[in-house]
Every structure is written in structure tokens, then in C-alpha cells.
Image: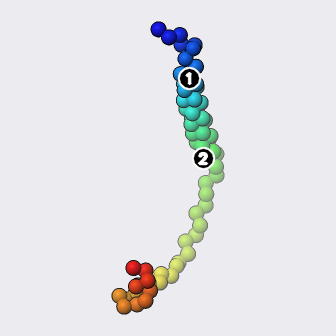
């Protein structure tokens, strides 16, 4: 049987996985706390908007250059 202390790469992999897990948990907690403390955002008032439609028939040059 191998001695666990001589397998340094196993400890390195375990330490890397632990650090990634710890960073993920920390980032999630910070994100949750910041979202909770942020004041509610006032929505912008809705403004009416214009909708413009442009028709292109099959004989136009714009259609032939796009296709």
C-alpha cells in the first residue's frame, strides 16, 4: 500500500477542488447578500413608441444583395 503523504498530487487535487467549492459558496453568499440589501429599482415609465414596417419585394436590389 502507498503512503498517503507521499501522494502529493492527490492532496493537490483535493485542495484545488476544496478551494473551488469554497470560492463558489463565498460568491453565492455575497451575491445573495448584495441582492437582499439593494433598494428596489423604480421601473422606467412606459413611453408610447412608433413601429415602422418596411416591405421588400422579391425584385428589389436590397433583397438580392442580402440573399
53 vs 43, left or right, is: left
Q: Position of residue 28 (x, y in %)?
A: 57, 39
Quadrant assignment, res 62:
bottom left
Label 2 crowding class (10 Å Cα cut-off): few <14, some 14-19, many 20+? few
Residue 28 vertical placement versus 2 (above, below): below
Q: Distance between the Cα atoms at labels 2 and 1?
A: 39 Å
- Looking at this view, name the residue that lies furthest to the top: 1
Mark earlier in primary sequence (2, 1): 1
State the residue position of label 2: 35
The numbered mark at residue 25 is none
Helix, strand or loop for disc 2? helix
Q: Nearer the viewer, residue 52 or 39?
A: 52
- Looking at this view, name the residue that lies furthest to the left: 58
Q: Nearer the viewer, residue 45 or 6?
A: 6
Q: Residue at x 43, y 83 (%)?
A: 65
State the residue position of label 1: 9
Q: Residue at x 59, y 67 (%)?
A: 44
Q: Position of residue 60 (x, y in %)?
A: 40, 90
Residue 34 vertical placement versus 8 (above, below): below
The C terminus sits in image quarter: bottom left
Amino acid at each position: 500500500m502507498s503512503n498517503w503523504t507521499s501522494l502529493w498530487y492527490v492532496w493537490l487535487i483535493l485542495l484545488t477542488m476544496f478551494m473551488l467549492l469554497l470560492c463558489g459558496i463565498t460568491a453565492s453568499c455575497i451575491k445573495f447578500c448584495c441582492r437582499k440589501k439593494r433598494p428596489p429599482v423604480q421601473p422606467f415609465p412606459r413611453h408610447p413608441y412608433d413601429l415602422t414596417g418596411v416591405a421588400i419585394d422579391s425584385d428589389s436590389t436590397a433583397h438580392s444583395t442580402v440573399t
